[in-house]
Image: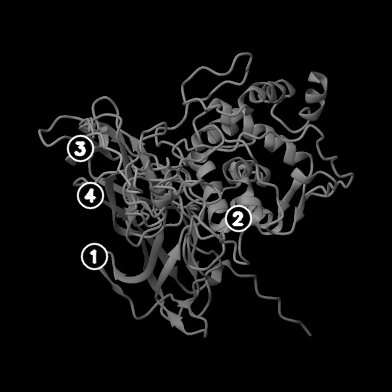
């Protein structure tokens, strides 16, 4: 049997040993009543897969329960076709994925191939997570737009056997205004969906109950932080960030390998639904449930004469006082304070030299560690955090400080804001203002020392080319203006002398909208001369203070330098 497992997992996983160990570890976890391990707990006996460090922004599901069913022993045969795409495998029910769900996974992979090509996300990973989290949206019970026919909810995360996550969405997504619950086919908790949610089907909203939206959000979540999933370390780190359990990692890897062997689509609503869960096979209800059977009642004894005698009711014992619910670290936070962030300024296209530091404090000013702080970029800007995201969630350290990822300026100039909130708790935040300035150069120099000369009414043989630098580095994409000026101390436009031509061939003596190329070079259009001789000046300026004045000479041709006259003919 062991050899059969090895053959089944031999292809497509990070290594044969890792895949075989994953199945061996999971075989023990399918028994009813098995519970998942918390992140940080030792791996199952015999497991060789290492647990990479998980990022400090929690995880997508709040470590909610998941389905623990393993893939079948008989893997689908891979397609003999060498073409890229989904190998077709028939005959194995578990290899079939509901058509709409499968389409959502593939569309998400295609979008990420363009937006985050370095991530190398395979759609089969989304299928593996979707299988483990919701049984492929309960076998594909979705409508034509990909929205589940009924809500898919995990148990309320009230700390009773699960994580304690108090309500963060006022019940908007999960219908629970007391505690959060994992929502939808990819089982996002509301606090994660608030920043990770995506619109995958183009209807203008991000809905965790829609498989297109949820699959795309899961893909972006797994690809954040510039992670590359083509390697074992990056793949494992991303999966563990979704649910921080070693058993979960092994199970997802097992399904990933299975789907890589081949799969096919089945009609929506006909997919199989797993039967075993990590919380012991049942999902705890989030509210009171109706009993399965009516309670049995004892017959009431009768006194002689047919009169009923009521049973004496024993006095009810006093209810024990409810133990106080301990406060989470987040609930002790009264406000957020700046932790020494310097002025945030960067040139367009550059990285900001400073990072935002924020401290969580109690009302008395005491630092609070292990609190998640969400940083969100707002305003009309294309600036992002490192990795291309506009939202980042970072946990505070022992000193109560969370340091946001580095900011990267886009091309839009101006001010924008970064807001901060405590995840899962209302506390006064602190806002930061960042400024993006236009690209600049501090030095301009000609690339040639050839004199620029022309005869009256002619055209200059050489075009003016300059190179721009900023602090010694190439200054690319820098705006520039070129003006034919009256004098060195009079930068107003000259109304005579050399000129450029516009699209209609008319003289122009000021050019705007110029820009250096990727190497910091700028070549001006051809220059022409009118019939006035003399020395003229061309001035080029850029943001940042770079100025270069170029001398232009217009003079009649030197007759002595011309050809000798032909000898006259003799008779």
SS category of the residue bearing label 2? helix
- CA–CA distance in space, label 2 to label 1: 56 Å
Label 4 or label 1, whichever lies nearer to me, is 4
Q: Residues within 10 Å of mark 1 (few under 14, many from 20)?
A: few
Give the residue at mark 3.
333
Residues marked 3 and 4 touching at CB (< 8 Å): no
Residue shown at 22% from the left, 40% from the top: 342
The quarter of the picture where residue 320 lies is: top left
Residue 293 is left or right of residue 272, and the answer is left
Q: Which residue is identified by label 4?
A: 431
Mark 3 to mark 4 CA distance (whole Å): 17 Å
Is 208 on the left or on the right of 569, as rendered?
left
The single residue placed furthest to the front in the displayed view is 305
Q: Give the labeled residue for mark 2.
A: 111
User: What x and y, as percent, mark residue 542?
Assistant: 35, 59
Q: Residue 40 at x, y = what percent?
A: 46, 22
| Mark 2 or mark 4, earlier in chain | 2
Q: Which residue is mark 1?
A: 489
Would you say the residues marked 4 and 1 are in contact, meaning their CB atoms lie under 8 Å apart? no
User: What crowding class fits label 4: few (fewer than 14 Cα within 10 Å), some (14-19), or many (20 or more)?
Assistant: some
Residue 306 in the image: x percent, y percent?
36, 48
Say which quadrant the C terminus sits in: bottom right
């Amino acid at each position: 049997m062991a050899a059969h497992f090895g053959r089944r997992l031999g292809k497509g996983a990070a290594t044969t040993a890792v895949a075989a160990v994953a199945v061996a570890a999971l075989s023990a976890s399918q028994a009813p009543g098995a519970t998942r391990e918390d992140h940080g707990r030792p791996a199952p006996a015999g497991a060789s897969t290492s647990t990479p460090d998980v990022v400090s922004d929690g995880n997508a599901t709040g470590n909610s329960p998941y389905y623990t069913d393993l893939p079948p022993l008989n893997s689908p045969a891979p397609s003999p076709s060498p073409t890229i795409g989904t190998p077709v495998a028939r005959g194995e029910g578990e290899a079939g994925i509901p058509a709409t769900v499968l389409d959502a996974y593939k569309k998400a992979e295609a979008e990420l191939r363009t937006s985050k090509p370095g991530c190398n996300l395979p759609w089969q990973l989304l299928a593996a997570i979707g299988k483990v989290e919701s049984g492929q949206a309960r076998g594909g019970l979705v409508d034509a737009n990909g929205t589940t026919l009924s809500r898919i909810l995990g148990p309320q995360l009230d700390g009773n056997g699960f994580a304690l996550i108090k309500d963060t969405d006022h019940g908007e997504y999960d219908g629970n205004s007391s505690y959060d619950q994992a929502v939808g086919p990819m089982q996002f908790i509301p606090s994660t969906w608030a920043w990770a949610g995506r619109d995958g089907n183009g209807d203008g909203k991000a809905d965790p109950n829609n498989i297109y939206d949820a699959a795309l959000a899961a893909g972006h979540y797994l690809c954040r932080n510039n992670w590359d999933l083509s390697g074992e370390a990056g793949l494992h780190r991303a999966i563990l960030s979704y649910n921080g359990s070693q058993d979960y990692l092994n199970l997802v890897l097992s399904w990933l390998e299975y789907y890589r062997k081949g799969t096919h689509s089945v009609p929506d609503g006909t997919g199989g639904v797993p039967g075993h869960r990590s919380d012991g096979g049942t999902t705890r209800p989030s509210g009171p449930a109706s009993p399965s059977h009516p309670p049995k009642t004892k017959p009431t004894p009768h006194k002689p004469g047919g009169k009923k005698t009521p049973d004496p009711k024993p006095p009810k014992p006093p209810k024990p006082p409810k133990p106080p619910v301990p406060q989470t670290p987040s609930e002790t936070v009264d406000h957020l304070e700046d932790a020494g962030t310097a002025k945030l300024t960067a040139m367009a296209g550059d990285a900001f030299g400073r990072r935002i530091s924020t401290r969580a404090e109690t009302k008395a000013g005491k630092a609070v560690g292990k609190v998640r702080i969400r940083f969100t970029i707002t305003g009309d800007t294309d600036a992002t955090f490192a990795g291309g995201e506009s939202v980042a969630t970072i946990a505070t350290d022992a000193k109560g400080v969370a340091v946001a990822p580095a900011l990267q300026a886009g091309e839009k100039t101006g001010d924008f804001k970064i807001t901060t909130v405590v995840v899962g708790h209302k506390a006064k935040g602190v806002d930061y203002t960042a400024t993006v300035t236009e690209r600049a150069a501090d030095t301009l120099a000609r690339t040639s020392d050839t004199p620029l000369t022309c005869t009256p009414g002619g055209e200059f043989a050489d075009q003016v080319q300059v190179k721009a630098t900023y602090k010694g580095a190439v200054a690319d994409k820098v705006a520039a203006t070129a003006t034919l000026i009256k004098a060195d101390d009079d930068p107003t436009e000259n109304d005579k002398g050399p000129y450029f031509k516009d699209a209609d061939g008319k003289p122009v003596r000021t050019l705007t909208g110029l820009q250096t190329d990727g190497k910091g070079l700028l070549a001006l259009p051809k220059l022409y001369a009118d019939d006035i001789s003399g020395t003229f000046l061309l001035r080029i300026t850029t943001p940042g203070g770079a100025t270069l004045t170029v001398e232009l000479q217009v003079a009649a041709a030197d007759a002595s330098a011309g050809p000798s006259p032909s000898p006259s003919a003799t008779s």
